[in-house]
Amino acid sequence: MPPDSEALWTEVSGCIQLSEGLLIIDDTTLDKAYASQMALVSCHWSGKHYEVVQGINLISLIWSDGDACLPCDYRLYNKAQDGLSKNGHFCALLQQAKTRGFDLTLVAFDSWYSSLDNLKLVRDYGWDGLTRLKSNR
């Protein structure tokens, strides 16, 4: 059975203040160097190794109030199956957060997600974005 982010939301929603704090979107690569036939394994950039490695890419949405940091949604990057890019997952995570009632002021994310479309989506939701801009933006 595929992972279910709704179950995660059910667990943490009572601990989150929807109008306080900030949202953080980031991804991580779970190394799987010897798993060429494993589902979800493909090539991804690894900040740990500073190179492209075989692994599973997990995109997480975290809520923080400055003290607590709680995961509230996630996506497994699998373009071959779902057709979504990392930026597509970024948009889906923010759309779901808006649907769930988040009404805060700040979303933080790394430069990988600093495309014009993503910046406009953050602005359209009435949120500010905190990111580094890539040199080609």
Image (cartoon, rainbow, N blue to C red):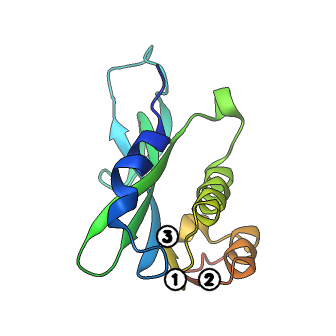
Distance of label 3 from label 1 (alpha carbons): 13 Å
The residue under label 2 is: 127
Q: Observer-nearest residue: 1 or 28?
A: 1
Q: Observer-nearest residue: 50 or 35?
A: 35
Residue 59 rendering spot, x and y as whole percentages? 48, 50
Q: Residue furthest front?
A: 14
Task: Please rate how many residues cluster around mark 1, counting C-alpha atoms within 10 Å: few if below 14, some from 14 to 19, many from 20.
Answer: some
Q: Amino acid at mark 3?
A: Asp
User: Which image quadrant: the C terminus?
Assistant: bottom right
Q: Observer-nearest residue: 89 or 18?
A: 18
Q: Secondary structure at mark 1?
A: strand
Query: Does residue 87 appear to the left or right of 20 in the view shown?
Result: right
The residue under label 1 is: 106
| Disc number for residue 110 | 3
Residue 8 rendering spot, x and y as whole percentages? 39, 45
Location of residue 9 with respect to 128 vertically, above or below:
above
Q: Earlier in the sequence, mark 2 or mark 1?
A: 1
Q: Amino acid at mark 2?
A: Trp
Label 2–label 1 contact, CB within 8 A: yes
Q: Residue placed at 47% from the left, 42% from the top?
A: 5
Query: Does residue 125 appear to the left or right of 4 in the view shown?
Result: right
Q: Earlier in the sequence, mark 2 or mark 3?
A: 3
